[in-house]
Amino acid sequence: MTPVRNVVIIGSGPAGLTAAIYSARANLAPLVLEGEPSSTSDQPGGQLMLTTDVENYPGFEDGIMGPELMASFRSQAARFGAELVAEKASKIDFSSRPFGIWVGDPDGAEPTYRASAVIVSTGARSIMLGLEAENRLMGRGLSTCATCDGFFHQGSSIAVVGGGDSALEEALFLTKFAESVTVIHRRDELRASKIMQERAFKNEKIAFRWDTVVDDLVGDGALEGARLRNVKTGETSLLEVTGMFIAIGHRPNTDLFRGILDMDDAGYLVTRPDSSYTNIDGVFAAGDVQDHTYRQAVTAAGSGCMAAIDAERWLEAQGDAPPDVAETPTNW
Amino acid sequence: MPTFTLSDANFDEEIGSATEPVIVDFWAEWCGPCKKIGPILEQLAEDHAGKVRVAKLNVDENPETGRRFQVMSIPTLVVFQDGQPKARVVGAKSKSDLEAELAEFL
């Protein structure tokens, strides 16, 4: 029989790793399933692994690179004894306690891990355009990671699709390399913060195509252009670009929990007001997987802290916590 | 270190004289996903020693080779056999996914 852990944390973005720091400091010896390497935001470290400068995380007055910030979160969790494994949950059983979590073959008879409490912080992943050409051109001009691939577009004309902070941050970053960056946005105003908008409007290399969507991508071996359509006038055009970066939003990583944990219409987990409690006792949720409103690294970290505290108190109430946790008030 | 390092200067000589297939990892310091697959490639090189070799090529310091093989996204893995590129994997992957995609060389 697989030994029972106090807490298993699924996901390793700001929410999961903050939950790991707090629950490790509460002597709960948490196990973090970090996820598997990928070039999407569904990877160890989460969405910040694909971002450049993070300028709004408090405590870093000059900003910090996303991957660097996440490496630091991770070391901090490890320092207090959190165990981190680069594995991805393939199935969960929350129907009875202790809960079961599978890694690898979901048909295995025994779960890979058992846990008294589970914190779900699987985050969200970027939405793609949904075009057939995307698979063919991914990594051949089409990219989900400006930090990784901006370098390959020195002196070229490229495009960024999207109108939020991520889109503008990528556009601004890409002006370091590209000759021109066209931001393609389906509406006539941006959702991005005012400071990012001002910077983008001021940048001479950045042009905007408003009310515009991408209908198709052109190019066989490598991206050559995009067929655009103005949603108001219906007018179509071809934009010649050799690079395109997609930042049109996110979708929560909740497929694993469908039919098990309560979620809203968009698939975000629903937590009880002012807490991280889900509809299943002993299962807590933190970060972007349950937040479609704020979606910031700092709010994710904050809710990861809430989940760790909720889990610790819940374990205490069950009498499941290690004795030194149950007897002494934790020094948070 | 089970892997070895390639540069613009030694690429042709090393790849041309290799007797086993060589998986070349095009990477750079500023690429988050590249760092995550680094340890996986070390492990892969160790597990499949004798069948395949794994080499690292830093595209930041060696831009020429990346351009020659049309690398436009990192991490990109290109497998060279008999001096020729035979397969390509774009993007970070788990160890099992990589082994599945590169099965014919392992």
Image (cartoon, coloured by chain):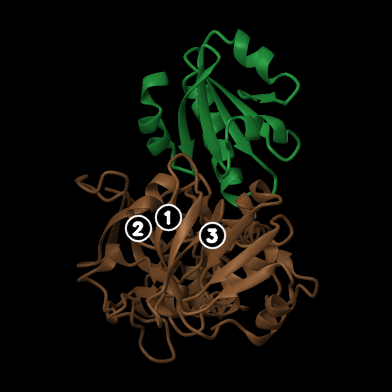
Chain colours: A brown, B green
User: Residue A90 placed where, x, y %?
Assistant: 30, 53
Q: Nearer the viewer, mark 2 or mark 1?
A: 1
**Residue A283 found in image quarter:** bottom left
Q: What residue would you read off at disc 3?
A: A245
Check the residue under mark 1 and report the chain it is in.
A
Q: Which residue is depicted at the point 43% across and 86% down? A: A275
Q: Which residue occupies the foreground of this view, A295 or A82?
A: A295
Q: Earlier in the sequence, mark 2 or mark 3?
A: 2
Image quadrant occupied by the C terminus of chain A: bottom right
Residue A104 drawn above or below residue A74: above
Q: Which mark is residue A217?
A: 1
Check the residue under mark 3 and report the chain it is in.
A
Residue B11 drawn above or below residue A316: above
Regarding residue A160, the answer to whether it shows in the image is yes
Q: Which residue is depicted at the point 42% across and 20% down? A: B105
Per the model, the C-alpha gap separating discs 3 and 1 is 12 Å
Per the model, the C-alpha gap separating discs 2 and 1 is 8 Å
Image marks 2 and 1: residues in contact by CB distance under 8 Å? yes
Q: What residue would you read off at disc 2?
A: A131
Q: Amino acid at mark 1?
A: Leu
Same-chain status of marks 2 and 3? yes
Q: Earlier in the sequence, mark 3 or mark 1?
A: 1
